[in-house]
Image (spheres, helix red, strand yellow):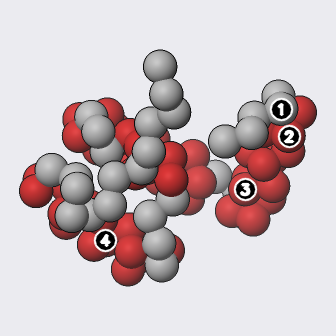
Amino acid sequence: MGIPTPLTKEQAPAELHKVYDQMQKDIGSIPNIFGVVARFPAALKTLIQFYDAVMNQGKIETKYKELAYLKTSIINECEY
C-alpha cells in the first residue's frame, strides 16, 4: 500500500470545492492532511469541525497549539 497523495481542488469531489475555497481564503493553502482526507468527503467535513474546535476555542493561543502538535509529530517520528 502506497502513501496517499493529497487531492487538489480539481481532483476533489465537487461537494468539497466550497470547503477548499474557504480553507484557501482562511489560511492561504490546503494543508496536506486535509487534501488526503478529502478522499473521504464525510471524514473531511468532520475533521474540519474537530480541527476548528481544537484550534480556535479555549484559552491557549493557536500558535502554541500548533507547536504542540508539531512537537508531538517529532516525538512520534512522524515523517509525513
Nearer-N-terminus badge (3/4): 4
At horizontal 47% and vertical 19% (from top left) the residue drawn is 1
Q: Residues within 10 Å of mark 2 (few under 14, many from 20)?
A: few
Tell me the CA gap for discs 2 and 3.
12 Å
| Foreground label between 2 and 4 | 2
Task: Name the amino acid, label 4.
Answer: Gln
Residue 28 is situated, as x and y percent measured from the top left of the image, at 48, 78
Tell me the CA gap for discs 1 and 2.
5 Å
In the rendered structure, find residue 22 and report the number of the disc placed on it.
4
Label 3: element kind: helix
Q: How many marks?
A: 4
At horizontal 49% and vertical 28% (from top left) the residue drawn is 2
Nearer-N-terminus badge (2/3): 3
Task: Name the amino acid, label 3.
Answer: Glu
Mark 1 and mark 2 residues within 8 Å of each other at the beta carbon: yes
Tell me the CA gap for discs 1 and 4.
31 Å
- The residue identified by callout 1 is 77
Task: Name the amino acid, label 2.
Answer: Ile
Nearer-N-terminus badge (1/3): 3
Label 4: element kind: helix
Residue 65 is situated, as x and y percent measured from the top left of the image, at 73, 53
In the rendered structure, find residue 74 and report the number of the disc placed on it.
2
Which quarter of the figure has residue 9? bottom left
At horizontal 72% and vertical 56% (from top left) the residue drawn is 66
Residue 56 is situated, as x and y percent measured from the top left of the image, at 55, 59
Judge whether residue 47 can be spotted in this image: no
Residue pushed farthest right? Answer: 75
Q: Residues within 10 Å of mark 4 (few under 14, many from 20)?
A: some
- The residue identified by callout 3 is 66
Nearer-N-terminus badge (1/4): 4
